[in-house]
Amino acid sequence: MRTITVVTISALLAVGSCGGGNHDFRRPSPRDARSPCPMLNSLANHGYLPRNGKNVSIDQIVNGIDEALNISPLSTRPVAEFAATTSTTGNPTTLDLDDLNQHGVIEHDGSLSRSDFALGDNHSFNPKIYNTVAKFFTKDVISIKTAAQARRARLIAAATQNPSYNFTAREDQFSQFETALYLAVYGKGTEGNAKTKWVNIMFREERIPYKEGYKRPTNVILNEHIVELAEKVAAAA
Ligand code: HEM
Ligand SMILES: *[C@@H]1O[C@H](CO)[C@@H](O)[C@H](O)[C@H]1NC(C)=O
Ligand SMILES: *[C@@H]1O[C@H](CO)[C@@H](O)[C@H](O)[C@H]1NC(C)=O
Ligand SMILES: CC(=O)N[C@H]1CO[C@H](CO)[C@@H](O)[C@@H]1O
C-alpha cells in the first residue's frame, strides 16, 4: 500500500514538473502547421505548444517557452503579441504556426536555414542552406565570434543569390536576435559558446536535445541577456 502511494505520488510529480502534458518528441504529421522558427517547431514537436500547430495562443507561446527553456515571459510576450498580428484564425490572440510564414512581419530574407521569399519555400528547413552556415561550427561549442561569422557569410550569400533581397536595419535586428536566442538557450549566460550538437539538433530535427543532455536552466534567461548577446553578435562580425 505504502509503495503504491509512493509510486503514484512520484508519477504525479513527474507529470506536474513538466506542466501536465506529454513532452515526448513526435514528428509532425503533414496536416500539422509549422513555422519558419526552428524553436517554435521544436516546442510543438514536444507538446509544449499544441502539436497540430493550430490556434496557438499568445499565452501558450509565452508559457511554453518559459516551461521548456526558462526564458522570461517579459521578454517573449511582446514578440508573441507581434507574431499574432499575422493571425488567420479569426481570433486575434491565436495563430496557426504557418501564419508566421507571412513575409515582412517577422519572416525575413537571409535566414540561416530557410530560403528567401523570392526564391521559393521561405519557411521549411533547407539543409543545403543550413550546411553553408553549419560548416562554420567546427568546434564542440559555437562562440559569439563563430556565430557572427556564420551569420555574416549567410547574409552575403543571400544578397548575392537573390535579386529581390530585402534586408533593412529591421531585418538585421531580427536576425541578430535569432542568433542571440540560440546562443542564450544552448550556450552559457551571455558568453555564447552554445553546444554545437544541440544547435544542430534544433535546426535539423526541430527537437529539444534532452537525450544529448539539455536541461532547462535553473537561472531565468532575461531580455537583457538576449539584448547583450545580440549586441555582441552585431559587433563581432
Ligand atoms: C515569441 C516567440 C517567438 C516567435 C514568435 C518566433 C518567430 C520566429 C520567426 C517568424 C522566425 C523566422 C525568421 C526568418 O525568416 O528567418 C524565427 C526564426 C528563428 N527563431 Fe524564433 N520565434 C520565437 C522564439 C524563439 C526562441 C525562444 C528561440 C530560441 C532558440 C528562437 C530561435 C529562432 C532562430 C534561431 C531563428 C532563425 C532561423 C533561421 O535563420 O533559419 N525563436 N522565429
Ligand atoms: C482557439 O483558442 C482559443 C484560445 O485558447 C479558444 O478559446 C478557442 O476555443 C479555440 N478555437 C478552436 C477552434 O479551437
Ligand atoms: C523591405 O523591407 C522593409 C522593412 O521590412 C519594408 O518596409 C519594405 O516595404 C520592403 N521593400 C520591399 C520592396 O519589399
Ligand atoms: C513557395 C512558398 O512556400 N512560398 C511561401 C512564402 O511565404 C508566403 C507567405 O508570405 C507563403 O504564402 C508562400 O507559400
Image (tube, rainbow, N blue to C red):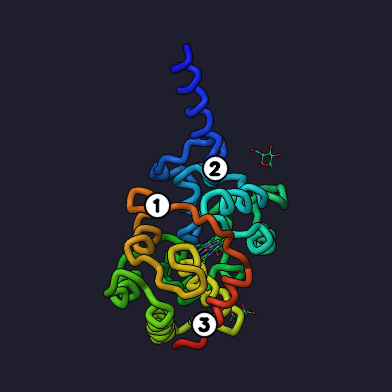
Q: Closer to the camera: disc 3 or disc 2?
A: 3
Is residue 168 placed above or below 88 in the rendered structure? Answer: below
Dot 2 falls on a residue whose secondary structure is loop
What residue is drawn where x is 65% and y is 57%?
73
Is residue 114 placed above or below 53 in the rendered structure? Answer: below
Q: Pick whichever of labels 2 and 1 is earlier in the sequence.
A: 2
According to the image, label 1 marks what residue?
207
What residue is drawn where x is 35% and y is 58%?
201
Q: Dots 1 and 3: beta carbons under 8 Å?
A: no
Q: Is 98 in front, or is 59?
A: 59
| Amino acid type shown at disc 2 | Pro
Q: Is 113 in front, or is 222?
A: 222
Q: Pick whichever of labels 1 and 3 is earlier in the sequence.
A: 1
What residue is drawn where x is 51% and y is 88%?
235
Give the percent coordinates (x, y) of residue 127.
32, 65
- Cα separation, mark 3 vs mark 2, equals 34 Å
| Amino acid type shown at disc 1 | Arg
According to the image, label 3 marks what residue?
232
Give the percent coordinates (x, y) of residue 228.
57, 77
What residue is drawn where x is 33% and y is 53%?
212
Q: Is 43 in front, or is 164?
A: 43
- Cα separation, mark 2 vs mark 1, equals 15 Å
According to the image, label 2 marks what residue?
50
Q: Is residue 71 left or right of residue 59?
A: left
Is residue 57 placed above or below 37 in the rendered structure? Answer: above
| Amino acid type shown at disc 3 | Lys
Q: Closer to the camera: disc 2 or disc 1?
A: 1
Give the percent coordinates (x, y) of residue 16.
55, 35
Quarter of the render that holds ligand 2: top right
Q: Is residue 199 visible?
A: yes
Residue 138: quadrant of the picture:
bottom left
Is residue 207 placed above or below 14 in the rendered structure? Answer: below
